[in-house]
Image (cartoon, coloured by chain):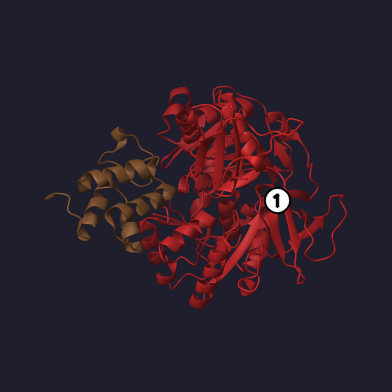
Amino acid sequence: MMRNIEKYRNAFINALDLEEDDVCENLALGVTREWDSIGHMTLISEIEEVFDVSLDSEWITEFDSYLSGMELLKRLGVDFINE
Amino acid sequence: MNSFKKFEEFGNRTAVYAEREYSYSEMLEIADAICGQVGERTLVFCLCSNNKESLFGYVGFIRGGVVPVLLDASIHIDRLRRLINLYKPTYIWASSENQDLLKVMDSSFVFGDYTLFRCPTFFQHDLDEHLALLLTTSGSTGSPKFVRLSYENIFKNAESIGKYLDINADDKPITTLPMNYSYGLSIINSHFICGATIIVTDASIMKKEFWDLCREQRVTTFGGVPFVYEMLNRLKFEEFNLPSLRKLTQAGGKLSTTLSYKFAKVCNQKGIQFFTMYGQTEATARMTYLPCEKNLEKVGSIGIAIPDGELILHDDNGNKITAPNVIGELIYKGANVSLGYAESLFDLSKKDENNGILRTGDMAYFDQDGYFFIAGRIKRMIKVYGNRISLDEVEGLLNEHGHNCICAGTDDQMYIYTLKEDRVQIKKIIKEKLNLKGFEIMKIEDIPRNHFGKILYSELPKYG
């Protein structure tokens, strides 16, 4: 089974059309070229699907970087450490 | 006619909020200083983001009779170089950190994060006296074709918009669209001439800081292309609590009937006026609006002509259609119809070629009450996330790069058909050169053509 961190990385690769090497902790909405509003919508759908969660508007608007997304997912019970 | 020259009368009213308040007086001082550095009437490029620097530069240039070309700050350097060669601007107003410009140009003036770069080669432009501004025609296909707009175009359109939206000095729009895009710019112009306060932010509606700013600054209005409304829908706009919000506008392509209906309903419940509008850069910005009290009854309609504008339908023989529910080409008449196009600096001395009449290229009909509905496009143009894309231009670009492709599609769905195994390269070109999303690449065996060699787009897979 794929680990959560890998699922999370893959969500960025798939949704934003990134290369494997492009995915890093510095990715940010509006800064990373591929992560614009359109990319954001795709990314949200992708994350909802792979983690089987429903993201509300507060979540969507607070999610603005690679790291903040992990923090926000932790709040929804997604474990990135002990798996 | 230059309404920006009358801004002194708004004095200490707040013109712009961008991290802090700027009064009209303060804005004018800065704007005129930027333009003063340019001096005489000439051509400049303005690389725009939604920030105070771009906005003040624009205001200064229009006031001072300097003709700006508004371009997106994220423009690809190859395209920018091409435009510089074609139009030979005297100055470029751009971010001080623009490495490409820093290397080859001197700085002559700095305000905030922007620098006025002096171009090394000087060209004496011959500019028609009415020419005020140049805007790009299609969002990002890289066409060097600009729309030539006059001072009268800009301010007549802004006045009409001010009338039907009942804009006043207490309005506070927030930026949701690029200012170099005609719809985004029309929001700025129509509010500035009324002495309103523009809340300037580069943050997208997908960011918390955007909504925090809306609440903190008590924003009263914003506009959106269909994609903005799709995002608002995703964010569950109906649950938002924004008591200061009074007016929403939608243009830049057809919003799906489902979403039009939903937003009309939600807005009516919340006491927000929701306006659907239709326009083109060739008409400065806007040509029609659907009065908000009709937004449910006439859902899907582009409405009626803006004040002081007129809509006519022509049949195939160029005769005026007078009966309802008959499709014909939509023709618009009004003082906001642009002077014409420019494809190089030699076109900048041209006079008005349209004489107030615009063939929109859209097919339309009106119902028994006189409300207009768009039926489709004559030319091969689609809108992808609000950006107008010419399918022929995309084909041209790919052919330039050695890919034998054809393009088809409808709004927000572009299909690229290729004969070779070159999907990866095509994807790369589209991404790099056009920064486009929402397209699909398909390999086909051969291009369907009729006896005359004309491509039969309707026989392509999926699209047909």
Residue B366: x %, y % from top left:
75, 64
Image coordinates for residue B24, horizontal then vertical, percent: 52, 56
Residue plotted at (39% across, 66% down)? B215
Residue extending farthest front: B445
Q: Nearer the viewer, residue B234 or B223?
A: B234
Density class for disc 1 (Cα within 10 Å; few <14, some 14-19, many ≥20) is: many
The quadrant of the image that shows the C terminus of chain B is top right
Label 1 lies in what chain?
A: B
The answer, for residue B90, to whether it is visible in the render is no
Q: Colour of chain A?
A: brown
* x, y percent for residue B42: 64, 34
Identified at 40% across, 34% down, the residue is B97
Q: Colour of chain B?
A: red
Q: Amino acid at mark 1?
A: Asn
Name the residue at the left extreme.
A82
> Which residue occupies the foreground of this view, B31 or B105?
B105
Name which residue lies at 21% across and 48% down: A4
On the image, the x and y values in percent for residue B125 come to: 68, 30
What residue is pinned by disc 1? B153
